Image: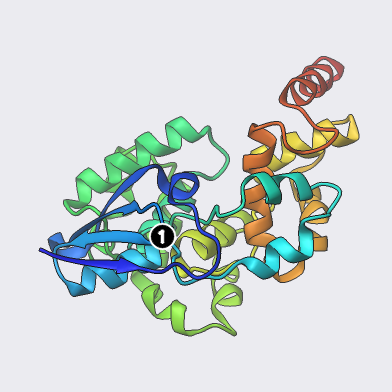
Amino acid sequence: MVEATLEPAGLYSLKLTAGAAWKGRMPDGRWASAVQLQDGRILVRASCERAIEEARFMLALDDDTSEFHRRFSRDPLLGPATRVLRGLRPRRKATVAHAALRAICGQLIQAGRALEIERAVIRSSGEDPPTREVLARLSPAALAKCGLAGSRASTLTRLVRTLDLEGLKQSSNTALARLGRERGVGPWTVGVISLQGLGRYDAGLVADLGLVKLLASLRGRWPEPEETADLLEPYGEWQGLASMFLLQGFKQGLIPGASADRAHLVRTRATHAA
């Protein structure tokens, strides 16, 4: 076992990001755990030096998001959340393939069911976290047995068999466009892979159900999922991180003029009107 005390770039909260104590699995049996010390540094214990570096990425320790907070601290929607949740960063997957699995499983279904399917696929693959190679061995039929709809199973199989997913981390100028050209991969899927797999903040979670509910609460009508792009557009290259803060802020009642109760009322009215 090895350990390292790491200095996060900018203000960082492990509790907000991953809980008071974090444990993560990496490929080939590597592992790491982390706690935040009173001075703000992160104590990481790991199976090897490589796992420490992987933990840095998974916990987004090297990403200074101070500019995001500076630019949007007075934003009429995002401002309160950026102030209350200061130090929150995305918790990433150890492999881009795992992020792709999470994204495909989460398309247009409830989060709980999506997680059940994801876990079933991981069990079937035999590796946690799954790599591109192990997922590529699973046929669409095998994925369907895990609960994944046929079209999504085909999409996942095609992604892991034809794309160098890990290599997309180095293709900063073309990665998102390349993903978006794939059949069955829409803006939300690109956003999830970007945030949780590639470590990018510029792809928003367009059409996320939570953002649909937020927009419904704000506008008083049930919107089309793609209308959430208008909600995220003002945040430019920070749309991915803004998505995360909007979703978490909505859950905690930090978005001015929005509430889960109002969203539920709007949805009920829309259902009855139909």
| Residue matched to label 1 | 59
Tell me, yes or no, if residue 94 can be seen here. Answer: yes
Q: Looking at the image, which is closer to me, 59 or 239?
A: 59
Provide residue 42's location: percent of width, then percent of height: 35, 60
Residue 60 falls left or right of residue 6: right
Tell me, yes or no, if residue 184 can be seen here. Answer: no
Taking 141 as reference, is 57 above or below it?
A: below
Taking 146 as reference, is 38 above or below it?
A: below
Q: Residue at x 56, y 55 (%)?
A: 87
Residue 187 falls left or right of residue 123: right
Crowding at mark 1 (Cα within 10 Å: few <14, some 14-19, many 20+): many
Provide residue 271's location: percent of width, then percent of height: 78, 19
Q: Looking at the image, which is closer to me, 19 or 222?
A: 19
Quadrant for the C terminus in the image: top right
Provide residue 220's location: percent of width, then percent of height: 89, 29
Provide residue 27's location: percent of width, then percent of height: 21, 63
Taking 216 as reference, is 3 above or below it?
A: below
Quadrant for the N terminus in the image: bottom left
Amino acid at the residue labelled 1? Leu
Q: Looking at the image, which is closer to me, 28 or 69?
A: 69
Q: Residue furthest top?
A: 272
Render colour scheme: rainbow
Taking 254 as reference, is 29 above or below it?
A: below
Residue 47 falls left or right of residue 70: left
Element type at marker 1?
loop
User: In the figure, residue 237 lies in which quadrant?
Assistant: bottom right
Residue 29 falls left or right of residue 92: left
Q: Looking at the image, which is closer to me, 171 or 154?
A: 171
Q: Residue at x 87, y 31 (%)?
A: 221
Q: Residue at x 41, y 58 (%)?
A: 39
